[in-house]
């Protein structure tokens, strides 16, 4: 940030330096390059008016120096002033193009955010005895929505969750996300076993790839983690389909990556075969938090190329508020990368409440007709 502020001061500094240089050196030495550089540097950082004023200040100062040394009627004086004036006009054109591009980028981001809100609505803050929080952080370098997705649903089997990442960005990725989230919401209610929910998503993405045809038929897939927290229980069941392992955060314990016993293929790759996927069960006592995330978190790099390590970052951190936890993680990743997140990241945190009756009104009966 301080670099940006320093650069904004540079045009003024160049004009001052040019003035000092012109007054301190013989007439055969020219300060015109310093004056010409001022509006060019102002163009990407200043407004149109600011760039215009910088160009006028540089041109007028150069003309004033020629008057001061009585060279205003000489050929080199006209050449220098015309050069600075021409560069100033060019700087205004550059400024206008940059501003127009910035407006288009802002518009694209607004559209992407609207699409994201429609496809990925935020989950309830309290659900089935859990505190829930979610975040979607877009990459600093992208105007298009990415393929990260999440969904949380209260069912008669418990609270079921999916968080994943489909291949690609833009409209194609949004379409795939819509297919995956829609398949999850239907299967989460219908299927008895969590593994079957994953199979339904797998089949939905496979059919979508066939429908699209071409190269998409070979490259449409998604990594994902599915979780199930049964009602009135202190466990969580996980199915991992080629996705980064979630973290189990418990007060007084180091963060624990919930790594599957065997790696499984991503969703949409059922044609490649592989061993049957089995859910694995872990303890989720009161006060514990399940943190799920996409690879945008673990692949965030700092200036030295070091990846962000959520286990190390969260070691020793206290607190059971999932929203505060995600806010802290986003801030810490931004600090690690100095604001240059290279890929979208989705974060989802679910905290088991200490009160077993908390959220009882939100629970769905095991018998839907009851």
Image (cartoon, helix red, strand yellow):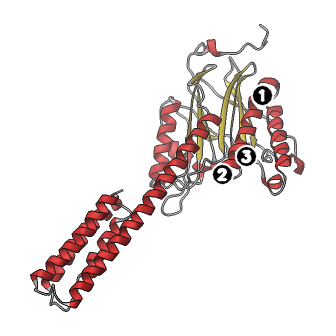
Of residues 252 and 323, the one drawn nearer to the viewer in this rendering: 323
Residue under label 3: 223
- Label 2 SS: loop
Residue under label 2: 169
Disc on res. 210: none
Q: Quadrant of residue 293?
A: top right
Q: In front: mark 2 or mark 3?
A: 2
Q: CA distance from mark 1 to mark 3?
A: 19 Å
Looking at the rendering, in which quadrant would you find the N terminus?
bottom left
Q: Residues within 10 Å of mark 2 (few under 14, many from 20)?
A: some
Earlier residue among tags 2 and 3 = 2
Q: Residue at x 38, y 72 (%)?
A: 90
- State whether residue 6 appears in this view: no
Q: Quadrant of residue 39?
A: bottom left
Q: Where residue 349 sits in the image (x, y, percent)? A: 58, 33
Residue under label 1: 186
Of residues 60 and 175, the one drawn nearer to the viewer in this rendering: 60
Q: CA distance from mark 2 to mark 3?
A: 14 Å
- Label 1 SS: helix
Earlier residue among tags 2 and 1 = 2
Q: Where residue 104 sits in the image (x, y, percent)? A: 51, 53
Q: In front: mark 1 or mark 3?
A: 1
Of residues 336 and 76, the one drawn nearer to the viewer in this rendering: 76
Q: Where residue 49 sits in the image (x, y, percent)? A: 30, 59
Q: Is residue 35 found left or right of 156 in the rendered image?
A: left
């Amino acid at each position: 940030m301080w670099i940006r502020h320093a650069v904004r001061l540079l045009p003024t500094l160049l004009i001052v330096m040019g003035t000092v240089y012109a007054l301190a050196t013989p007439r055969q030495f020219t300060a015109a390059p310093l004056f010409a550089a001022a509006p060019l540097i102002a163009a990407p950082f200043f407004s149109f008016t600011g760039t215009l004023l910088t160009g006028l200040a540089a041109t007028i100062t150069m003309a004033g120096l020629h008057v001061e040394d009585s060279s205003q009627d000489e050929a080199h004086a006209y050449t220098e002033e015309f050069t600075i004036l021409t560069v100033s006009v060019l700087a205004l054109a550059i400024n206008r193009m940059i501003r127009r591009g910035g407006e288009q980028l802002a518009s694209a981001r607004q559209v992407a955010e609207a699409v994201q809100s429609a496809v990925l609505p935020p989950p309830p803050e309290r659900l089935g005895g859990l505190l829930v929080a979610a975040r979607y952080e877009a990459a600093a370098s992208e105007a298009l929505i990415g393929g990260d997705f999440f969904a949380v649903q209260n069912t008669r089997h418990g609270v079921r969750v999916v968080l994943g990442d489909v291949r690609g960005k833009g409209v194609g990725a949004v379409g795939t996300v819509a297919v995956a989230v829609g398949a999850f919401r239907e299967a989460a209610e219908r299927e008895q076993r969590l593994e079957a929910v994953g199979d339904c998503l797998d089949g939905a993405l496979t059919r979508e790839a066939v429908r699209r045809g071409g190269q998409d038929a070979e490259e449409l897939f998604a990594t994902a983690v599915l979780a199930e927290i049964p009602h009135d229980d202190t466990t969580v069941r996980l199915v991992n389909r080629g996705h980064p392992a979630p973290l189990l955060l418990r007060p007084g314990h180091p963060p624990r990556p919930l790594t599957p016993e065997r790696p499984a293929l991503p969703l949409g790759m059922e044609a490649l075969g592989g061993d049957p996927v089995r859910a694995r069960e872990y303890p989720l006592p009161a006060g514990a938090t399940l943190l799920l995330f996409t690879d945008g978190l673990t692949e965030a790099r700092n200036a030295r190329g070091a990846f962000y390590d959520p286990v190390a970052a969260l070691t020793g951190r206290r607190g059971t508020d999932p929203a505060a936890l995600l806010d802290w993680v986003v801030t810490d990743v931004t600090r690690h990368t100095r604001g240059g997140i290279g890929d979208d990241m989705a974060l989802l945190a679910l905290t088991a409440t200490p009160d077993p009756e908390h959220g009882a009104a939100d629970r769905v009966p095991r018998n839907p007709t009851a």
